[in-house]
Image (cartoon, helix red, strand yellow):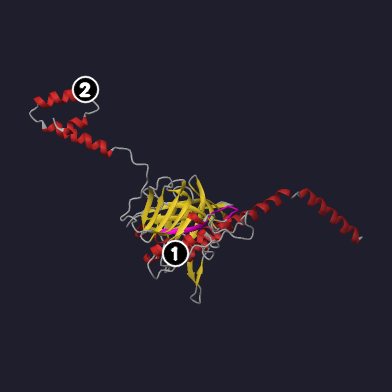
Amino acid sequence: MSSQVETAFADRPDLLSRVRIQEASSNDPRLFEEIASLINNLRVTSAPPSKKRKLETDATVKKPAFFTLKDVGFQLPQRKKATFKISLDGIKILDQTNGEIIMEVASPDIEQIFCLPQPEKQQRQSNFLIIPRGGEGFSSSKDQILFVLPEAAVKNEGDATFVPSALPVGIPSTSLGRDENIDKMMTSYLNIIINPYKKQVIVPDASEFTSAIPQAHRRGEPALYAKANRGSKDGYLFLLPSGMVFGFKKPVLYIDLSKVTAVSYTNILSRTFNMVVTIMTGEDGSEDVEFGMIDQQEYAGIDGWVRKHGLDDQSMAAKRAAQISGKARGDNKAQNGDGKDRYEPGELARAEAELEEQRIQDEEDELEEDYDPEEEEEGGSSEEEDYEEGED
């Protein structure tokens, strides 16, 4: 009897003895060996996965780290404190107890990195979101990296280590200083590894979008995001030069601007509206991503961002489409007599005008309901009597 058969039925001695009998009298003893081999292979492939969540990448991070930061509070891929390392060829997250790799991403596999303000916090904090290729937050998304850093200097100098010798000559570097905020340091170091791929850490820009709703915890400082819902999940929508980010609940959604084919507005109510973003999912495929319960006050800023990047308001179109080049803008763009572009009001703007007309009509209806013809008749007869008395 082969070792394959012995291994396959090692935990079932009762079956093993019967297999031995059948194998000895069989005309095709190799059949039992092949069955046993299949059982052994199935056991290997169905084994529970390791708890260590290491992202599959085309290349591993092998070069020494030039920057290490301990006690980093991660939300993704795991909610825990860990050590973060930056090397010229990528990034690593290490378990602080045993040093095992939790996750690593090679520099060429980084799709985009964002540094976004933590919403509605009194203390200034920055969310660092690292999107690997295929990690945009949709159904087949790979693991993302999300961690929060305060906009302050490092508390313990031993938690941050900078090794200039791990950088090649010619790359600008900033020595570790107590007076420099850790979030600024992180941004500059991450830029070092993605700049060669014509990328940089993206931060919100007030020229792209600012909220019209004042922040209760920071008066006089506009928010750089809009509150929104995606299904039952509430979050914050950032409109950026490269696209949209909706966070920060797992998974964070990233929509690259180059994949957006149209933006439209639906479910327009007196106080809120929904925005539908149509994105390309393949050569001929498309998918609608809807953000709901957006405050009406945010419309001007959002629509300004849509127009700035050449996306159509196609709310009433059967099939939404837009040209990212900005050459054609559908029904929303026309030309004045002087040849300059002008914009026709979008669907939401028209709806707002209709709501205003309805409000005025309701007020007029209320005045008509309060009108009492008998009072006017009495008033009119009294005036007539006074007039007649005056003639006498």
Labels 1 and 2 touching (C-beta < 8 A)? no
* Residue 191 shows in this picture: yes
Secondary structure of the residue carrying tag 1 is: helix
- Image location of residue 128, percent across then percent down: 47, 56
**Dividing the picture into quarters, in which one does residue 173 lie?**
bottom left
- Image location of residue 27, percent across then percent down: 7, 28
**Residue tagged 2:** 14
Q: Earlier in the sequence, mark 1 or mark 2?
A: 2
Q: Is residue 337 magenta?
A: no
Residue 90 sits above or below residue 53 on the image: below
Q: Disc 2 residue type? A: Asp
Secondary structure of the residue carrying tag 2 is: helix
**Residue tagged 1:** 330
- Residue extent of the magenta highlight: 112-123
**Dividing the picture into quarters, in which one does residue 30 lie?**
top left
Q: Disc 1 residue type? A: Gly
